[in-house]
Amino acid sequence: MPKKQFHDYVRDMERRTPNVTAYVVVNPQEPAKWGRVVFTWPKDGMGKTHVVAWLPGAPEGDVFRQAGYASGCGYDKATASISGAHYRDLKAGVTKRIEDRGQNWDRQLQEAGYLVIQAV
């Protein structure tokens, strides 16, 4: 079976629209360079939480892309599903990864200088 491509994850995400949460990630110094993070949640809370993310800060103004999921219950599935995603730390000027270390994914981006706004 061939490995899924990023666009396959996006298409799958579009089919799971009833339980969606979406965020906009804004670089306040360059608002035109923004990203987005979209989560879909299981109906029962026990299934998989999926994420597709486009995070700003890659070289040449591009974005870092990430698709992932986490399953189970009793922990922060949003952070677990997006962990490993690259982003540019605006304060330190280096590329970092979102870590699943007990701190919410959005707080890690906020500490790096981004505004994280829930859109849906």
Image: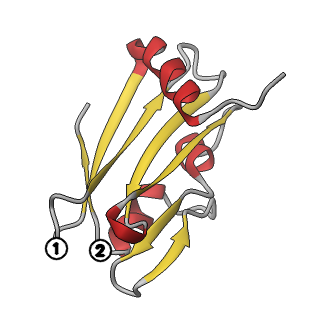
The amino acid pointed to by label 2 is Gly
The residue at the point 38 percent across, 67 percent down is: 57
Q: Secondary structure at mark 1?
A: loop
> Crowdedness of circle 1 by 10 Å Cα count: few (<14), some, many (20+)?
few
Q: Quadrant of residue 28?
A: bottom left
Image quarter of the C terminus: top left
Total number of numbered discs in the rendering: 2
Q: Is residue 43 shown above or below 51?
A: above
* Residue 53 drawn at (x, y percent): 45, 44
Q: Residues within 10 Å of mark 2 (few under 14, many from 20)?
A: some
Judge by depth and name the residue closer to the eye, 41 or 114. Answer: 114
> Quick check: 94 left or right of 29?
right
Question: Considering only order in the chain, which callout, 1 or 2, is on the residue closer to the N terminus?
Answer: 1
Residue, far front: 60
Residue picked out by circle 1: 29
Residue 36 higher or lower than 44, as above or below: below
Name the residue rendered at 63%, 64% in the picture. 101
Query: Residue flagged by tag 1: what amino acid is it?
Result: Gln
Residue 93 appears at what percent x and percent y? 40, 85
Query: Pointer 2: what residue?
Result: 113
Give x and y (percent) for residue 92: 41, 87
